[in-house]
């Protein structure tokens, strides 16, 4: 069992890792491998959005995207709700967030599953029923606060919390399975699990999550992660980016991006190098790097990230995670 100090260190590092990965992937999100190579080469640090970056056009180096912003939103609502994410309150907050982004002229808006769910809510569908078709990675990208606030010792209870947080937008076996994998890996890491142990817990939680919510045809996040974590390390280093892009996939589909993030964690590389690789692979780079960063931060603690990287992300985005971590861990402690 980890000490309270160590638990707080790893929980804070999980949120820092999420934000750092998000910021590294910001300039390359939704771009193809050839476009990334032409504009940036290989990502090795924070850079400004380039000329072909449509979604994050004009954003400066170190800026985060919706991944971090919505994770902060989830954290705040969890604390307000004493550990429960009220579906109607969450739906209202998501609608308000997108309207704020649109008013600023941002193209970094809600993802496809979340957008569909929000529109259904606006059309009068009850918030608790709106997420019956959501299978993309929107729930997984913002689930880290649930992993911090919920102990993974009881995986069924953790998946209950994940489903509660996902119900508004991603109440499907695929959406819940992907989010459960990330939340469980983060939670296990906070309690001292190694990378391998955290991945074991992620696969187990995904299997449980895939039995929840509405059924939608699609590959199993649990099965694909179990395969990819063993397969990717066998691919020669110079071929891994192409393998992730062409075989695992890097789209917003949970069965691609969540699996890609966890497969990168399985490589057992330096955490910063892992996130730079995630930011260089094309597709949904910011989300893949954010999810991998959250897991790596939870597993390794503050040692995973340089103080300069943490300071730049916090300064550029005016974000301070320490206070929210204290409140989330109070929820975790209360559950034990």
Image: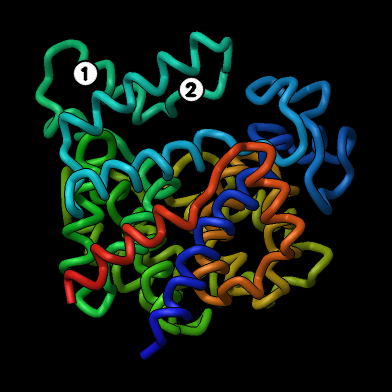
> In this orientation, which residue lies closer to the viewer: 171 or 147?
147
* Residue at position x 85%, y 49% in the image: 42
Find the distance from the CA under tag 1 to the CA under tag 2: 16 Å
User: Which residue position is annotated with label 1?
Assistant: 120
Given this view, does label 1 or label 2 mark the residue nearer the observer? Answer: 2
* Residue at position x 30%, y 36% in the image: 134
Say whether residue 314 is left or right of residue 84: right
Q: Are marks 1 and 2 in contact (CB under 8 Å)?
A: no
Task: Decide: few, some or many residues near mark 1? Use Cα within 10 Å; few <14, some 14-19, many ≥20.
Answer: some
Residue 162 at what x, y percent from top left?
25, 54
Residue 96 at what x, y percent from top left?
34, 19
User: Which residue position is annotated with label 2?
Assistant: 109
Task: Decide: few, some or many residues near mark 2? Use Cα within 10 Å; few <14, some 14-19, many ≥20.
Answer: some
Say whether residue 22 is left or right of residue 207: right
Residue 90 at what x, y percent from top left?
24, 33
Residue 233 at what x, y percent from top left?
66, 75
* Residue at position x 49%, y 12% in the image: 102
Q: Is residue 99 above or below residue 44?
A: above
Q: Is residue 61 above or below residue 225?
A: above
């Amino acid at each position: 069992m980890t000490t309270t100090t160590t638990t707080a260190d790893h929980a804070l590092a999980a949120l820092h890792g999420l934000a750092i990965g998000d910021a590294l992937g910001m300039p390359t999100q939704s771009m193809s491998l050839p476009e990334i190579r032409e504009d940036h080469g290989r990502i090795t640090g924070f850079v400004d959005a380039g000329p072909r970056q449509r979604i994050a056009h004009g954003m400066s180096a170190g800026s985060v995207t919706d991944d971090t912003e919505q994770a902060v939103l989830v954290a705040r609502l969890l604390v307000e709700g004493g550990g429960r994410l009220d579906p109607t309150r969450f739906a209202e907050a998501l609608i308000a967030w997108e309207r704020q982004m649109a008013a600023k002229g941002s193209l970094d808006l809600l993802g496809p599953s979340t957008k569909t769910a929000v529109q259904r809510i606006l059309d009068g569908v009850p918030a608790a029923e709106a997420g019956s078709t959501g299978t993309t990675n929107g729930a997984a990208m913002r689930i880290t606060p649930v992993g911090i606030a919920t102990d993974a010792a009881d995986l069924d209870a953790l998946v209950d919390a994940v489903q509660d947080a996902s119900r508004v937008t991603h109440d499907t076996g695929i959406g819940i399975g992907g989010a459960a994998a990330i939340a469980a890996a983060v939670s296990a890491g906070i309690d001292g699990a190694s990378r391998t142990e955290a991945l074991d817990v992620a696969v187990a939680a995904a299997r449980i999550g895939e039995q929840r919510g509405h059924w939608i045809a699609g590959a199993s996040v649990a099965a694909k992660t179990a395969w990819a974590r063993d397969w990717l390390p066998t691919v020669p280093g110079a071929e891994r980016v192409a393998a992730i892009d062409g075989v695992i996939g890097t789209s917003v589909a949970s069965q691609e991006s969540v699996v890609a993030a966890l497969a990168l964690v399985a490589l057992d590389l330096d955490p910063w190098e892992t996130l730079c690789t995630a930011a260089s692979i094309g597709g949904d780079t910011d989300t893949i790097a954010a999810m991998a960063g959250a897991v790596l931060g939870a597993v390794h603690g503050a040692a995973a990230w340089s103080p300069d990287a943490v300071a730049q992300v916090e300064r550029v985005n005016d974000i301070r995670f320490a206070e929210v971590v204290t409140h989330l861990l109070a929820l975790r402690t209360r559950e034990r």
